[in-house]
Image (cartoon, rainbow, N blue to C red):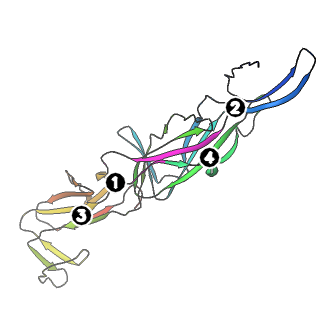
Amino acid sequence: THTATIDFDIDAQYSVVMGYEDLAGNVVHEKIIENFGIDKVKPSELKIEYAEKSVLDVILEGISFGFYQAPVKVILSAIDETSGVDFLTYSYTVSDSVSKVNKGKKDVVISADELTRSKYPAEVAEDKVQYEKVTATFEMPAQFRGNVSFFATDRAGNPSDIKKDDKVIVVDNIAPTRVVKYSPERIFDAKTLTDVSSFEENDNVILYYKKSAVITFVIDEANFYPEDVVIKVNDVERSPSNWKQNGDVWIGTITISGDGDYVVTMSYTDRSTN
């Protein structure tokens, strides 16, 4: 018995063919021993894209944010030069110190039969090589605030580096709620100028104060930015100087002093346009 060893060390697809003739002239005809591939290179060209256009893109303290309404379709793609991509593994991870209403997912596998395969680049010159590109999608529901990441694993078992989108994605379909609180000395019906014991918002009443009027604004919103609140006193903007947070609830106050008649209005739209 004679044994020979050949080392295959370069990434490629191989077909080994063997033929043999002994010293007496007996011939063993060429025979395919094996078809196999060598792939030591991890997948590359990982990309994360979004099918929908964001409602708003902003940069806050050097961090890029994209605000969306659900669902958000995320498009993942990667290439592998030799054996081809076998599966993708994605996560969308909630940022630190944000509302607990936000939910993410970790290490979700998109299997081979769920991948769309194509040639990359789509068109090449005759002397250039095309590789296999895979594409897959998934949807992010509301509520979410954080980052998307994924990696690709080829058929040889090589995992790629993790691709993380540095943009913070905010998916928000919940409209904020708000309450405005007053503590007047007396309440009068605006038409009859008679005392009333209570009132609801938009009732036609006049509130009277002996001293300064302190008005409290309470907003329940997971993705709150104080600068988006518009409060006006007699059509002049007034902003609470110090919002206080309790979970998703934010509380701010303004004080109105001086004799006079005042009309207070407030509006707020979050950055996903709720």
- Residue 84: within the magenta? yes
Q: Nearer the viewer, mark 2 or mark 1?
A: 2
Amino acid type, label 3: Asn
List the residue tagged with mark 1.
223
The residue pinned by badge 4 equals: 135
The amino acid marked with disc number 4 is: Thr
Mark 3 or 4, nearer chain start: 4
Mark closer to the chain start, 3 or 2 = 2
**Separation of marks 3 and 2 at Cα, in angstroms:** 77 Å
Could you tell whether 247 is left or right of 212 in the image?
Answer: right
Q: Which residues are magenta?
A: 82-107
Mark 3, mark 4: which one is toward the viewer? 4
Circle 2 residue: 37
Crowding at dot 3, Cα within 10 Å, few <14 / some 14-19 / many 20+, comes out as few
What's the distance in space between the residues labelled 3 and 1, CA to CA? 28 Å
The secondary structure type at the circle numbered 1 is loop
Q: How far is the residue under mark 4 from the one under mark 2?
A: 23 Å
Nearest the camera: 185 or 82? 82
Left or right of 145: which side holds 246?
Answer: left
Q: Nearer the viewer, mark 1 or mark 4?
A: 4
Element type where label 3 sits in the image: loop
Report the Cα–Cα distance between label 3 and label 4: 56 Å
Q: Disc 4 on helix, strand or loop?
A: strand
